[in-house]
Amino acid sequence: MAVTKTRPPMSELLAGMRNTTPLVIGAIPFGVIFGTLATVNGLSFQATIAMSVFVYAGSAQFIALGLLAGATAWPIIVATTFVVNLRHLLYAATLVPHVKNWSHLIRPPFAFWLTDETFAVVMNRWSEQKKPITTWYYFGSAFTMYLNWQLCTFIGLTAGRSFPNIAGWGLDFAMPVTFIGMLMPYLKSRVMWWVVLISGGVSVLAYALPHKLGLMLAAACGIAVGVLFEILVTRKGTR
Amino acid sequence: MNEVYLIAGMAVVTYLIRYPLFAVAEQIAFPDFLSRALQYVPPAVLAAIIFPSTLMPEGTLQLNYSNPWLLGGLVAALVAWRSRNLLVTIVAGMIAFGVCKWFLEA
């Protein structure tokens, strides 16, 4: 994929940033609420900033707050973080054919910046827009998300105190609504509908599993159904 | 002090999930069925996050008209389907959610 070299870096960077903007808007309330709730749940000011800077994983950070509020021991929170973030392994695996073309110098930071949002944006570039995932495109998306997350954490930490009830406003609906917008374009075939319905159904049924294991179980079931459906359909020779 | 362990631990486990496959990407050749399976990763994970957060916002299943998360989610899905525009979807979904919540609480 020598195309990587021929696409102008600036336009790739800007395209990555532009296509990430809607997701940034969806992530703003999420980040601000995190910053606001962190100190309420017993995390210090510095630790809140450090968590966003060094861990950089929104849903795991939220779950950590919930566990901290329940006075959970830190090793349990770390174990839960591991399970909650396991989906990034699936993302990394999906990106492998593209990452192959990238320099080894940029892989460590790019891996650190892998999130639900950046994964969705770069995969959309490939599967919907039929364009290669260039390093500048990835950087444009990743850096925009990262900067936004830090800013929002800080805003929540400082200005959030003036709005103590912010968590009750329902602003956290921004995350599911963003994800719904990212999911719908995939629903173009019967197999995708099955993947979504099975994964969604299992996630509800398995919700009570410890350490948020339900998410991974649900995703695994959905993926398995997709593969099974594909095998059955190709064996029959019908499409 | 525990905060240092907590954040270092969270950072390390998260990075150990994100980085290794990137590091050895050129040495990996997935068998055919696995590459096929990976194309279902985005919709499967998105669905596994969306369903519980809209159907059971307070931890128990709420399949009824008084659940603004579900109503807002349905509006967002419909708008996403018709408009194919993420920003329009987010704005419409948030407005629908806000209106439902306001009506249900009034």
Image (tube, rainbow, N blue to C red):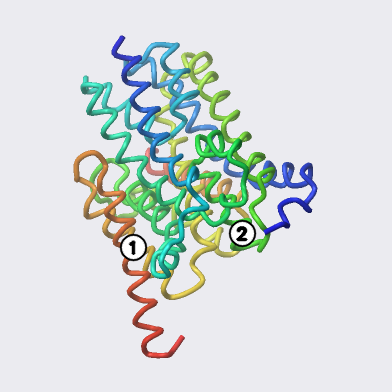
Locate the N terminus of chain A by quadrant.
bottom right
Task: Specify the quadrant of the image occupied by residue A218.
Answer: bottom left
Q: Residues within 10 Å of mark 1 (few under 14, many from 20)?
A: many
| Residue at image coords 46%, 39% | B19
Q: Which mark is residue A126?
A: 2
Q: In this orientation, which residue lies closer to the viewer: B40 or A199?
A: B40
Q: Is residue B72 visible?
A: no
Q: Residues within 10 Å of mark 2 (few under 14, many from 20)?
A: some
| Residue at image coords 51%, 47% | A178
Give the Cα separation between the discs numbered 2 and 1.
Answer: 22 Å
Tally the marks. Answer: 2
Q: Secondary structure at mark 1?
A: helix
Q: Chain of mark 1?
A: A
Q: Secondary structure at mark 2?
A: helix
Please provide percent x and percent y for residue A153: 50, 23
Residue tagged by mark 1? A222
Task: Specify the quadrant of the image occupied by residue A138.
Answer: top right
Please provide percent x and percent y for residue B69: 39, 47
Please provide percent x and percent y for residue A64: 32, 28
